[in-house]
Structures are given as structure tokens and as C-alpha cells.
Image (cartoon, rainbow, N blue to C red):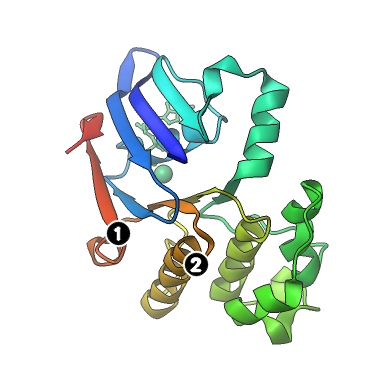
Amino acid sequence: MVLTVTSVEKRFGKVSILNGVSLTLAAGEAVALTGESGSGKSTLLHMIAGLEPMDAGEITINGKALENLRDAERATLRRENIGIIFQQFNLIPSLTVAQNLSFQARLTGRSVDIDALASSLGLTEHLAKYPEQLSGGQQQRVAIGRAVAASPKLILADEPTGNLDEATGDAVFDLLVTAAHDKGAALLIVTHSNRLASRADRRLHLRHGHFQ
Ligand SMILES: Nc1ncnc2c1ncn2[C@@H]1O[C@H](COP(=O)(O)OP(=O)(O)O)[C@@H](O)[C@H]1O
Ligand SMILES: [Mg+2]
């Protein structure tokens, strides 16, 4: 398994947010995560990325338990194994599309075929542009390209289509599912849309602190 989450609990102060959440993700599997606003979807993704501590339970990435790692080891595990796409595109404004695409891969010392990546994302004509010169959908495709360029084993996407119109959102969602299938990555993708969730291989719905 690329990812195992076992009986994870999370509280903020006295408020229990996650109350025994378990899931497993295999290589090449695309899973949609749904749930009302405030149900804890982002919190769960942050904990899987090792960016937020948990109160109980266990999370393993590629068989390594996060809580057994020091901060620096956790950062390395994240950099080498996880591609993260946030709702805000988080592109670097002073870098071109080509430079943004190769950014994370360069941090991990992996070489990237930028032309092939840009072609698969429909960004070939935009490689020399800066993020502010792109539409929202184009920027989100760059963010996806950057996250998948280093061939992560796990892709975490937090409402990546939230700011996009329906047609662009559908295209971005399908692009991520296809990337997971083609590259054998495990994908966990948060969406508000039941229609989009049904396009994933499997669906998990978070309610009252656990999956239903
Ligand atoms: N750092 C934090 N401190 C206190 N409460 C938080 C914090 N982060 C999130 N919460 C609360 O936890 C709940 C779940 O938040 P979140 O994971 O962002 O939900 P979702 O992504 O499903 O909308 C919300 O009630 C939110 O207000
Ligand atoms: Mg959220």
C-alpha cells in the first residue's frame, strides 16, 4: 500500500474533528474524498502530508510510519514521495511555466521531460509565460504538472477544481485521475462535486468525524 491511515483522531481544543478515520490507497488508485465544508477533509490531507500532528492513530507512507520520523525525515519523505495540489494554485510568480513545472523535481534531483509534460497538459505554447499571463484553468494545470513532475507515489489534491468553471474543472479532474492511472500513483482528491467524485475509482465520504 502507498498509504495507510489507521484509526486517526484529531481534535482542535475540545472539538473533535476526526474520530477514528481509516483508509488505504494502492498504487494507481484514484479516490475521491467528499464531505461538507468543515468536515475535516483538509485537516486529513495535511496530516497525511505530515504537516499537522494527529492525536491518535497511525499514518504510513510506503510503509514508513510518520510519527516515527524526525521533522527533517518527514520533510524528505514528503518531498520525495508526495505531490500536493492546493486549492490556490501556489505558483511562483517570478518563474516561467517551464521553471514552475521543473521546480519540485529539481529539489529532489530528478530529471523531467518538460516538453512531454507540457504537451500532456496542453501547455506547450505557454512554457515561456509567467503565471499572471495564464487563465485560472491553465494555472491549475501548471500546479498539477509541478506536483506530478517528480513522479510522486502519492498525489494529494485539495479541491483542485474549486475555483474553476465546470468544463475546466472536469478537464483538470480527469487529468489527475489519468495521471494517477498512467504513472501508477495513488491519488486522494477532495471535491465538493458528486458528479466529479463519481469519476474516481472509489469514493469516501467524511461525516461526523468518520467515513460513511
Ligand atoms: N488550525 C486550526 N485550529 C482550530 N480549528 C481548526 C484548525 N484547522 C481547522 N479547524 C477546524 O476544523 C474543522 C475542519 O476543518 P477543515 O479540515 O478545513 O474542513 P474541510 O476541509 O472539510 O472544509 C473546521 O471546523 C475548522 O474550523
Ligand atoms: Mg478544506
Q: Quick check: 201 left or right of 174?
A: left
Q: State the quadrant of the C terminus.
A: top left
Give the mark nearer the N terminus: 2 vs 1. Answer: 2
Give the x, y percent position of residue 31: 34, 52
Residue that badge 1 annotates: 201
Q: What is the tally of numbered marks visible in this picture?
A: 2
Residue 35: quadrant of the picture? top left
Q: Residue at x 77, y 46 (%)?
A: 108
Which is nearer the eye, 191 or 117? 117
User: Is residue 5 placed above or below 189 in the rendered structure?
Assistant: above
- Spatial CA distance of label 2 from label 1 is 14 Å
Give the x, y percent position of residue 58: 42, 21
Q: Quick check: 87 left or right of 113?
A: left
Give the x, y percent position of residue 126: 72, 82
Q: Residue at x 62, y 19 (%)?
A: 69
Which is nearer the eye, 145 or 165? 145
Q: At numbered mark 2, what does the secondary structure look like: helix, strand or loop?
A: helix
Which is nearer the eye, 38 or 26? 26
Residue that badge 2 annotates: 182
Which is nearer the eye, 205 or 2? 2
